[in-house]
Amino acid sequence: MTVGTLTQRAVALAGGTLLALSPLTAQAATPSQPEPQPTLAAKGATLVDDTSGNTLFAKDADTARPIASTAKIMAASVVLDTTGVDLERQVPVQQEYRDYVTQHGSSTADLQTGDKVTVRQLLYATLLPSGADAAYALADTFGSGATSAERTTSFIAKMNTKAGELHLPHTEFTSFDGGGADSSTPTELAELAQHAMKNDTFRTIVKTKEYKGEAPAANGRTRYYTWTNTNQLLGSYDGVIGIKTGTTTPAGDCLVFAATRNGKTLVGTLLNSTDRYADAAKLLDYGFGSSTAKSMKLRALPTHAQRD
């Protein structure tokens, strides 16, 4: 056998070996299957990558539904977006703010009539214990008109104007606290949350588990307030930085949430869920590629804390 023939046979054998290996090589190069999307209890939901703006998950995300107290995100945004807003401005607490809570059975910050609380404190009181009395105070302070009815109507109009500016055509507000027929879609509510989270003060407030502060009382003494954040996802799921709960009979349990891990921020919304915190943990696991939802233990709220 000549050298040339041996060379040809060697090449043929090598080629055969390569051919035999190539199916295995192709199999190893096949990309892994994507994680299955989570099954949620919520009727409407979305999850968005805050940096890219890409929607990672959507369930009936463009259907408008009642949003309960998550409407207070917009109330806070209207205040914080006000040009030259003075967060240390003192606002006297009116009896009608307390009466509103009683009449509507709303969650409350238990503001005491005659106390002078700052705008900053009112934002904490609105967003942590979801105080309708505090939301009323903000609307009465930042609306226009001769009477509180005119001012609150004006403030609600500002909320709707802001929705238009943010290009949220399916978002509508009929109250300053989410106690009316306020509605939005999961998609638009996430867009509102992304806008709100651009404000440093808003971000600081909604990631706070508990606020303690004091205010001049009507009797000349000092009133001490403690407000606990109703969002139990805070302190329960690693990386959560807010945002707001909401519950009414028409809306069911709602939640707007955000979390950051390894420089990646996700923003999500859940409307009408029977298990909103488990839903949120499932979505965040899906977005982060983690598996901590099953072992999550919810942060317990003090017995005196508001539920929303």
Image: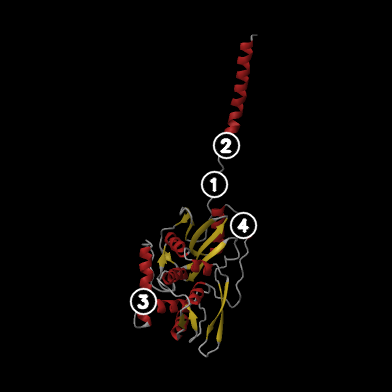
Q: Secondary structure at mark 3?
A: helix
How far apart, in angstroms, are the residues tagged by discs 3 and 2?
A: 62 Å
Residue 297, x across and y down, in percent? 63, 64
Within 10 Å of disc 4 (Cα), the crowding (few <14, some 14-19, many 20+) is: some
For the residue pair 85 and 142, the one nearer the viewer reads as 85
Please report the residue visible at 55 percent of the width from the left and 44 percent of the height from the top. 33
For the residue pair 285 and 4, the one nearer the viewer reads as 4
The mark closer to the camera, 3 or 1, is 3
How far apart, in angstroms, are the residues tagged by discs 2 and 1?
A: 15 Å
Count up the numbered dots: 4
- Quarter where residue 66 is shown: bottom left
Within 10 Å of disc 2 (Cα), the crowding (few <14, some 14-19, many 20+) is: few
Q: Is residue 212 above or below residue 188?
A: below
- Quarter where residue 62 is shown: bottom left
Residue 279 can be seen, yes or no: no
Mark sitting on residue 34? 1
Mark sitting on residue 292? 4
Q: Secondary structure at mark 1?
A: loop
Name the residue tied to disc 3.
153
Going by the numbered disc 4, the residue's amino acid type is: Thr
Name the residue tied to disc 2.
29
Within 10 Å of disc 1 (Cα), the crowding (few <14, some 14-19, many 20+) is: few
Sequence-first disc among 3 and 4: 3
